Amino acid sequence: MAAASTIRPSRVLEDPSAKAVARVYAQAYLDAVTQAGAENPLEEITSFQDDVLNLNPQFADLLLSEALATDEKIRLIEKTIQPSASPVFANFLRVLAEHQRLNLFPLILNLAWLEQEHRAGRQRVLVKSAVPLSEEQLSSIQNRLQSALNSEPILIPSVDENLIGGLVIQVGDTVYDGSLKTRLGSLRRQLRKGYLHEIQSGRDRFSHPEGN
Amino acid sequence: MKFKADEIASVIQKEIEGFQSQILTAEVGRVIEVGDGIARAVGLSSAMAGEMVEFSNGTRGLCFNLEENSVGIIILGDYLQIREGDEVKTTGALLSIPVGNALIGRVVDPLGNPLDGKGSVISSESRPVEFPAPGVAQRQPVKQPLQTGIKAIDAMTPVGRGQRELIIGDRKTGKTAIAVDAILNQKGGDVICVYVACGQRAANVASVVEALTEHGAMDYTIVVSASAADPAPLQYIAPYAGAAIAEHFMYQGKHTLVVYDDLTKQAQAYRQLSLLMRRPPGREAYPGDVFYCHSRLLERAAKLSDELGGGSMTALPIIETLEGEVSAYIPTNVISITDGQIYLEPDLFFAGVRPAINVGISVSRVGGNAQTKAMKKIAGSLRLDLAAFRELEAFAQLGTELDAATQKQLDRGYRMVELLKQPQYQPLGAADSVISIYAGTKGYFDKVPVTKVAEAEVELLQFMQDEKSEVRNALIKELALTDEIEAGLKAALEEFQGRITANPKYSAAK
């Protein structure tokens, strides 16, 4: 479970204001589940998405869209989900329904994952390279990053042939760009700047100092 | 001379070997929304207000709004190439443009890219587009005149070096013509001119550039153009870019003249951006800081203290009014920031008074300090005389019988109005304006029929140049009416008056 789901990719379109709301619910849910003593706090909510909503798209539509009124949604939850869910999760869904926030469910799930990683002292790191990296290389990157960062990195490797060579590593919003493409770009700029200076100073060689 | 290929190759090789690149660190975000010249991005958690950012396709942008969860960016370039999900990264630099001598004679866009097809602008110097205005201690009072070459302005609303003089009027009343004439008049002088076209029709900009080229003014002029077809962000930053270009020369101790044509369009571009960014609209839907948008721009015009080299930046902002409405929001704002205004009126324009300056409500708050001594001496009463004439003229239209003194004052007034007319692209030198206005106010044209005054003036100036060059040269040298020069001028004018009264062309019935 751990390896596959630790890098659960985010598939949801960015919406900063919705994200802020969803983060509150995600944190509250995590707190509640942890307090209730669950061993794997996100198991139930993840399986609800993967095994219920994804397999029954019509049910997902009904529950997450605005098609039903709040009371009807609550009745639906009580009838179908409550019998097989833990009390905390059923309550969570009811709270979402009452506050008309069920449409944020996928976002809340994503943020709950990120929040849990954060609480466990782990951080996602995007690693872009020109060719696929071997296990060995990945683990050496992992080790280097672990000593550089204060948290345990979760590597998400991807391949971008445009980089030509080298690595691009992104931690949070910060990008460390060591790719050949960027280096060639800065070499080009530096050479051009140097020669521009040469041309400008050289231009004066051909003109008479006291004018024509 | 032959190039040695291996020598050049080895130089390049050495450079490449010496090249050390560090890993580039940048803050990135992702575009979540784009349209109409603006983009919104998430991430960029350490972006600064006004910082330059770069989109993944190389287009540059400017951080405009920093919000709780996102950053509002204005796109300086083609926004149609940017898509949702694109990466955007900070550069850690403020928006800056190339400045320096390499720009002189060029037509560039507000980012310094050439628009005139004369190749790239090779300049090693650059300057931030937004720059704080010089402080109190760094300035000195405006006291040196900047000759515009337009008689009516130099006589009644003089412009000094470092002054901000607003040119305001309806559409098609000759606002740009005054600014262009002022630029043309700097020919052979020590003033570097910057013409900023903001939201103008591209055809108009082309004709201004052509006029400047034709009259040899591009040798000391830079044109910054953001036409009506350019995106609003470029129109918004164009005046700041022009100010940065002029500022560079000002801090080198040189004199500059910058024309912002026109700030109404810039305010509209700024309004568009602000509304798209969802900043709250205020009066006429302009954002609350539209005053600051203009005040910080115009405050950059200054006369620097001698310790800083004594350079100056004179600003001629242009404002277009609607149906003469000077009490609209933007006109009142800019009137209150500037040191005076030149007000152009369509009625005068269509009555053939060109430049169509309404001398009654045009003022220069710097006043006589910014005038040559000679002009100050003769033009002192001109404004009041003309105002009195306008009143009398209205009275005379009632058809009442007038006494001789009043009739004389009216006649003088008609001739002065004629004398202050001036064709486009023909700025007059300081000495010539003094001669013309002196002759007019002292009544030397009183015998000339009103319709022939312009002709007689041309003849007078020709006469002074050809036959009385000693008086004219002394005036050019001193730019003051000493007793000696005045006596010489009087004698010359009397001789000229004798000549025109003898000329049947001028004695024809009135």
Image (cartoon, coloured by chain):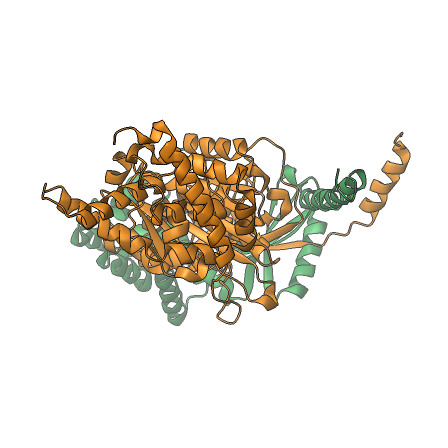
List x then y, in percent, for residue B321.
Answer: 28, 45
For the N terminus of chain B, which image quadrant? top right
Query: Where is B191 relative to A96, above or below?
Result: above
The answer to whether residue B317 is seen in the rendering is no
* Residue that appears at 56% across and 35% down: B216
Which chain has been coloured orange in this picture? Answer: B
Query: Where is B406 relative to A151, above or below?
Result: above
List x then y, in percent, for residue A87.
Answer: 30, 63
Left or right: where B24 falls relative to B383: right
The image quarter in which residue B495 lies: top left
The image quarter in which residue B417 lies: top left
In the image, B440 versus A52, the foreground residue is: B440
Which chain has been coloured green in this picture? Answer: A
For the C terminus of chain B, which image quadrant? top left
* Residue that appears at 42% across and 58% down: B376
* Residue that appears at 42% across and 66% down: A38
* Residue that appears at 77% across and 52% down: B20
